[in-house]
Amino acid sequence: MTITTLKEKTAKLEAAGGSVARLRTDAVDTADEMLGAAVAARHDNATERRLTRISAGAHIERALRLAGRGAADLKTLDKAIAEAPHRFHATRDALYQAERAIETASWRITPPLLEEALLRTLAVQSDPWTLHAELAEFGWNVYLVLALAFAHMGARAPHLFGKLSVDEEAAQADAANRLVAETLAVLRSMPQIVEELAQRYGVQVRPGLDPTNDVFDAALALR
């Protein structure tokens, strides 16, 4: 009787152990899926992807709002430069610098939004005061130059732009960052699961140190 009971209990323990192992594996798999979603969000939020999300029209709209001007002023500036380029030396160079920055830098996410910073950035062949004065003579400002640069680049290179508004793109980026932060917080609350993930991704677990960020970085590099 005793031997039979022991065998039965041993069998139950082995079965329970198998169930626990399967549950643990399922938990680690679920955590890995969460990690994968966070990694995808981080990849989707990379600068090179964000650069092509916002529409040229949305950039123009923001710049005109900052300029306190409308689309008619944009056409007037463009026409004035074309008809009398000798009167707009600083403005023409600023327009060229802005178009270059839109094409090659991060301005398709967010250009400099403070007027002083924008003047300093665009006044390469002149100085900020000269550029400001040249525009102010006609009641214009440097934001109008920025809007015109986006208009030119939108027409010349439409593939550089997307379809989102500025607010929509910012919300998408914020949501991705929030997903990553919340996922890492959940994983930190499950250190044993994270240790299992560390083994999967070849991350060394050092005593007393949280490996969550290292696991995330390893997954980011592999996926």
Image (spheres, rainbow, N blue to C red):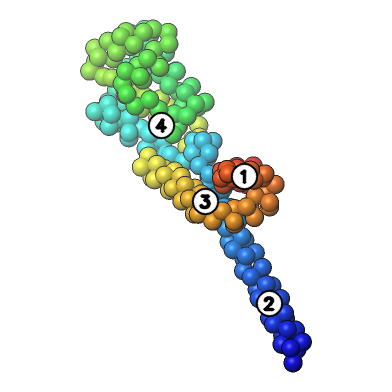
Residue in the image at 62% along x and 65% along y: 24
Tell me the quadrant of the picture where the N terminus can be found: bottom right
Amino acid residing under circle 2: Leu
Amino acid residing under circle 3: Arg
Residue 110's disc number: 4
Q: In this view, does 152 lie to the left or right of 74?
A: right
**Image location of residue 85, percent across then percent down:** 37, 11
Residue in the image at 36% along x and 8% along y: 127
**Going from the N terminus, do you reach mark 1 or mark 2 first?**
2
Residue hosting label 2 = 13
Q: Determine if residue 154 is in view.
A: no
For label 4, count other residues whose C-alpha is less than 10 Å away and answer few (under 14), some (14-19) or many (20+).
some
Residue 188's disc number: 3
**Going from the N terminus, do you reach mark 2 or mark 3 first?**
2
Vertical placement of residue 196 versus 122, above or below: below
Judged from the image, the secondary structure of the residue bearing numbered disc 3 is helix
Amino acid residing under circle 4: Thr
Q: In this view, does 41 lie to the left or right of 111?
A: right
**Going from the N terminus, do you reach mark 1 or mark 4 first?**
4
Q: Distance between the residues labelled 4 and 2?
A: 61 Å
Tags 1 and 4 in contact by the CB under 8 Å rule?
Answer: no
Q: Answer with the quarter of the image where residue 99 lies.
A: top left
* Mark 2 or mark 3, whichever is nearer to me: 2
For label 1, count other residues whose C-alpha is less than 10 Å away and answer few (under 14), some (14-19) or many (20+).
few
Amino acid residing under circle 1: Pro
Q: Determine if residue 60 is in view.
A: yes
Residue in the image at 25% along x and 14% along y: 136
Judged from the image, the secondary structure of the residue bearing numbered disc 1 is loop
Q: How many labels does the image show?
A: 4
Q: How far apart are marks 2 and 3 (CA)?
A: 30 Å
**Image location of residue 124, percent across then percent down:** 43, 11
For label 2, count other residues whose C-alpha is less than 10 Å away and answer few (under 14), some (14-19) or many (20+).
few
